[in-house]
Image: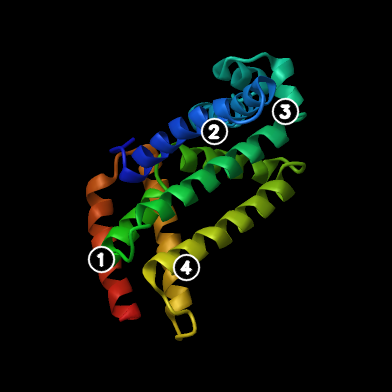
Amino acid sequence: MGHVTKLEQDLDQKANQNANQDTRQGGPKQARSRVTRRHLLEAAVSCLAEHGWAGSTVSVVAERAGVSRGAAQHHFPTREDLFTAAVEYVSEERSTALRELFQAGPAARPAVVEAIVDLYTGTLFRAALQLWVAASNEEQLRPRVTELEARVGRETHRIAVELLGADESVPGVRETVQGLLDMARGLGLANVLTDDTARRARVVAQWSRIIDATLA
């Protein structure tokens, strides 16, 4: 739901570039294997976001990716392997895309805050949310998702600190950055059921002022 963000547009462009690169690197068999793996990961995230954990089987993902179930299981022996790898893969891609948005140099903090909030909207966030809910009920999935969430959370925090130019040695700064991430996650949850674009814009503007005042 909601508009397509600049981050999502850049991520789509990067995915197309990766696809072209995959076809050029290594021999034909290696290239096909990389392309198949990436298609499975991207299909898994889309299926998880659209159908939830219960409706996202390896067979459903394989069909969406245009490969056989056997090919899917060659790359990912278990369902848990497939979906945790998929969320991690797309999280890494989005983190890279976020950094690349501001690779030209320091940007205005409101733009950084808006880009961070965009991390928690769209397909990846809905997929991750479904994975978290499943992990709360699936004992064999829970440790893997808990570890993945901790790792992704640390990386997102590092990126936020870097892009905001935050000095966490100053009292209160670390908590403010973490509060921004927690707020962004909450806005993402609100956006799952309805298009929350208008209210989100007002909240982002206020948080930008808070960040500026704290980091000044």
Instruction: Return the mark for residue 6.
Output: none
The first of marks 4 and 2 along the sequence is: 2
- At a point 37% along the width and 41% down the height, the residue shown is 10
The first of marks 3 and 2 along the sequence is: 2
Depth check, mark 4 against mark 3: the one in front is 3
Distance Cα–Cα, label 4 vs label 3: 36 Å
| Numbered disc 3: secondary structure | helix
- At a point 40% along the width and 52% down the height, the residue shown is 100
Q: Amino acid at mark 3?
A: His
Instruction: Return the mark for residue 75.
Output: 3
- At a point 66% along the width and 43% down the height, the residue shown is 135
| Numbered disc 2: secondary structure | helix
The first of marks 1 and 4 along the sequence is: 4
Which residue bears the numbered disc 1?
A: 206
Q: Is residue 51 left or right of residue 78?
A: left
Image coordinates for residue 45, horizontal then vertical, percent: 54, 33
Which residue bears the numbered disc 2?
A: 45
The first of marks 4 and 3 along the sequence is: 3
Image coordinates for residue 159, horizontal then vertical, percent: 47, 62
Depth check, mark 3 against mark 1: the one in front is 3
- At a point 63% along the width and 21% down the height, the residue shown is 32
Neighbours of disc 4 within 10 Å: few (<14), some (14-19), many (20+): some
The first of marks 2 and 1 along the sequence is: 2
